[in-house]
Amino acid sequence: MKNRNALLAILASLLIVGGYLYQWVNERSVTHDVQVSKCQISKSICMVGLDGDKSIEFSITPQGIPTTQALSLSVLTHGLDADEISVNFEGIEIDHHLPPYLLNKIDDEKYIGKGFLSLCVLDTMHWLAHVKIQEGQTIWRISFPFETHKAN
């Protein structure tokens, strides 16, 4: 029994360390980090210019980004030949370690998917929606700040 508990503790430790290592490697792979400050993704579509004539339009619906509903995520690319696009949500006050949501390619410029936020006990929670776009060896991470409010 002692050996089994020790083995489970070692496996749990390896999983935790592996998760942090994956996050560290994932963060280091970003070649362009863009912080958006002049658009409220919870209220409207946000358009962001990247290098040269490259840009994206990102939207999350329903507006207001409720924590009790599935979220529709949409990215339109302009001038990009994206290999993969994903969105992940990072909690500022409490990091919930939510998984990235891989978006499905609809056509050469449109990617859509579903995502979820975790419920939070805080009345107001601040978040970042990170859109990660891989185009060959180039990886953009475009971060959109927003907040959610606990439903009464």
Image (cartoon, rainbow, N blue to C red):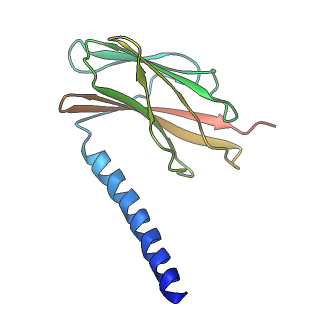
Residue found at x 45% / y 78%: 7
Task: State the residue lying farthest toward the right.
Answer: 152
Up-down: is 150 above or below 23?
A: above
Up-down: is 10 above or below 106?
A: below
In the rendered image, residue 21, in percent from the top left (x then y), is placed at 33, 58
Is 67 in front, or is 145? 67
The image quadrant where one finds the N terminus is: bottom right
Q: Is residue 78 left or right of residue 86?
A: left
In the rendered image, residue 46, in percent from the top left (x then y), is placed at 46, 18
Is 59 in front, or is 50? 59
Q: Is residue 50 left or right of residue 45?
A: left
The image quadrant where one finds the C terminus is: top right
Residue found at x 34% / y 53%: 22
Q: Is residue 65 left or right of residue 47?
A: right
In the rendered image, residue 35, in percent from the top left (x then y), is placed at 37, 32
Residue found at x 31% / y 53%: 24
Is 76 in front, or is 113? 113
* Rendering quarter of residue 150: top right
Task: State the residue lying farthest toward the bottom.
Answer: 2
Residue found at x 31% / y 46%: 27
In the rendered image, residue 25, in percent from the top left (x then y), is placed at 28, 51
Up-down: is 120 above or below 142?
A: below
What is the total number of numbered labels drawn onto the structure image?
A: 0
